[in-house]
Image (cartoon, grey):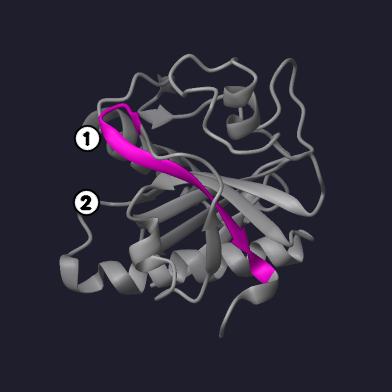
């Protein structure tokens, strides 16, 4: 099992990995969760998949086991910035605008994690190992990008597994139902990560 951080600058060195990640996102979010998201060529994508973002893939052979997208809170693309901030501004109809307890930050010290998934094909006995690899790569990549905090809209059960993965985090918004699942914004503090 490998963990790889992909950027527009290095994706050419990873063959089909980025396309496979977008295919796995389609399977997870469009097919399984039945979310109404853009897709093309069997791949899911949205307005935040720009050169400003990074993508983390946990993979074995050509199979994607898990993934995350990281976007700087300083990103801009037309009217969009990053998902949590755009939802707060009312730009995303599918996500409530009251998802955050404070004004969404715009800072080089804060990055957003989104499109977090673990493939349903991952057996239960390997899920914790896959999640740990995904989070460790997210921490490493975020730190290398200069982040001190990562903001993410995650399943409400985040508090059960976040400590086991060595992350220090706090609730940053109310629990809310989005597309049939309970979610909450969490703020992860990278300076307090245990190794």
Residue where numbered disc 1 is placed: 32
Total number of numbered discs in the rendering: 2
What is the number of the mark on residue 115?
none
The x and y percentages for residue 72 are: 72, 44
User: Magenta includes 151?
Assistant: no
- Residue at image point 64% right, 75% down: 192
| Secondary-structure class at tag 1 | helix
- Residue at image point 67% right, 33% down: 50
Residue 179 lies in quadrant:
top left
| Quadrant housing the N terminus | bottom left
Q: Is residue 16 left or right of residue 29?
A: right
User: Magenta includes 188?
Assistant: yes
The x and y percentages for residue 116 are: 43, 48
Q: Relative to residue 86, is residue 136 depicted above or below?
A: below
Residue where numbered disc 2 is placed: 120
Check contact, mark 2 vs mark 1: CB within 8 A: yes
| Chain part drawn in magenta | 177-190
């Amino acid at each position: 099992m490998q963990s790889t951080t992909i950027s527009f600058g290095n994706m050419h060195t990873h063959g089909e990995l980025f396309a496979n990640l977008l295919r796995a996102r389609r399977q997870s979010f469009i097919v399984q969760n039945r979310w109404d998201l853009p897709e093309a060529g069997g791949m899911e994508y949205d307005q935040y998949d720009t050169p400003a973002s990074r993508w983390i893939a946990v993979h074995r052979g050509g199979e994607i086991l898990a993934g995350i997208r990281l976007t700087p809170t300083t990103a801009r693309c037309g009217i969009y910035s990053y998902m949590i901030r755009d939802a707060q501004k009312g730009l995303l109809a599918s996500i409530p605008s009251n998802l955050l307890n404070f004004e969404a930050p715009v800072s080089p010290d804060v990055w957003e994690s989104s499109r977090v998934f673990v493939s349903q094909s991952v057996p239960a006995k390997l899920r914790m190992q896959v999640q740990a690899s995904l989070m460790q790569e997210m921490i490493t990549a975020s730190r290398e990008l200069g982040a001190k905090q990562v903001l993410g809209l995650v399943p409400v059960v985040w508090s059960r597994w976040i400590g086991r993965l060595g992350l220090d985090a706090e609730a940053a918004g109310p629990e809310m139902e989005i597309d049939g699942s309970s979610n909450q914004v969490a703020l992860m503090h990278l300076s307090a990560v245990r190794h």
